[in-house]
Amino acid sequence: MKNHLIQSFMNIQKISCTSDLWSGKNDLAYICVTSHYIDSHWMLNKRMLAFRPLTFPHTGTVIYQAIMDIFREYNITEKILSITFDNASNNVSAILKFKEFYDCKCVCHIINLIVQDGLTHIEESLVNIRLALKFITCTPSRVQAFGDFCATRNIPPRKFPLDMHVRWNSTYIMLQSCEGYENLIIEFNEMFNNRVDISPIDWQISKVFVQFLSIFYDASIACSGVYYPTSNLILRQLLTEKEMENFDLLQWWKAHEVTFPVLSIMARDLLTPPVSTVASESSFSTSGRILSERRTRLAASSLEALICLKDWSDADERNQEFVDSLEVDFTKFNIDDDQ
């Protein structure tokens, strides 16, 4: 399959890449490099190129050399148009060495920095809400007690996902899942937990902030697409909502390729770069399942083969979309729906 991929790259005009680093349970660091390209049928494709250990120290030079080795391995050095990184200092240093390529900053990472800074301003309310939810969800008996508490008030019991410090969207999901249950959470904690001082003011603050976060939440999902261009999202501001519903930019260029032969070549190149590194980060969920605590001695070559083969297999079925709890149906938090 790898040789077939190398062969197919010969017919591709330009390739854009994303890259990110990951630390496994075996205390080793791995670099992931993913390719993105538009084929002759104007279909946007994603293929993982490598998932392999990265030697310390993780300087810009080490990252640059590792990525260039991967490009040479696939014979695509001359085809690379751009590379998308996050804003880590070693990536910024590496970008300076990729003089022949365009560099793109990960929009989702920038959004994360903005939102994380905003969350510090409501930290006190977040702590109160988080502790109240932890009290409800910490044991099966407590979950059952809260379910019975809801039943006495003829309200469906609900499960509340706790957030993670490094994932701002998980805080949004946590707060959103509490909608309609604010008073119940306060009452339950007042009756059984005297160590948490949660008040209606905390909920008022969080409700306003959830409305604010929804803009960034929707933007993160839109920028995380795999099978549609993300570098052109400004078009959403130029077309009406009705036009956007049925507008497929790649299919438009496919239909007008003969009419605009030169512009179509430019469009194929410029619509390829992704605006986020989510495509590479999505491999971390797969690698985390493969390189579990029971498989920490799995050979690096075997890990890379398993992850790449999974990605290539999913690519054949156009099944590489990654949400990882980014896009959530909040109605599914009702416990009764799981039974």
Image (cartoon, grey):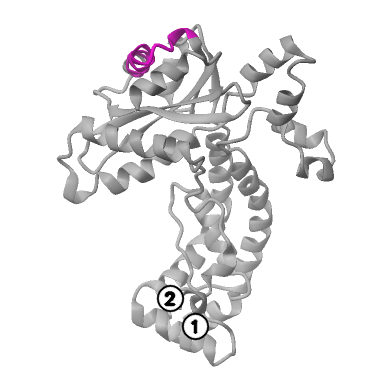
Pick the residue in front: 40 or 335: 40
Estimate the x, y position of residue 190 in percent, counting from the top left. Answer: 49, 83
- Residue positioned 24% across, 23% down in the render: 55
Which quarter of the figure has residue 114? top right
Q: Which residues are magenta?
A: 63-78
Q: Is residue 169 above or below residue 139?
A: above
Residue 290 magenta-highlighted: no
Estimate the x, y position of residue 49 in percent, counting from the top left. Answer: 38, 25
Residue 65 magenta-highlighted: yes
Q: CA distance from mark 2 to mark 1?
A: 8 Å
Residue type, label 1: Phe
Q: Which mark is residue 188?
A: 1
Asked if one can make out residue 182 in the rendered structure from this viewpoint, the answer is yes
Pick the residue in front: 36 or 55: 36
Question: Is disc 2 in contact with disc 1, using a CB cutoff of under 8 Å?
Answer: yes
- Which residue carries the number 2 mark? 136
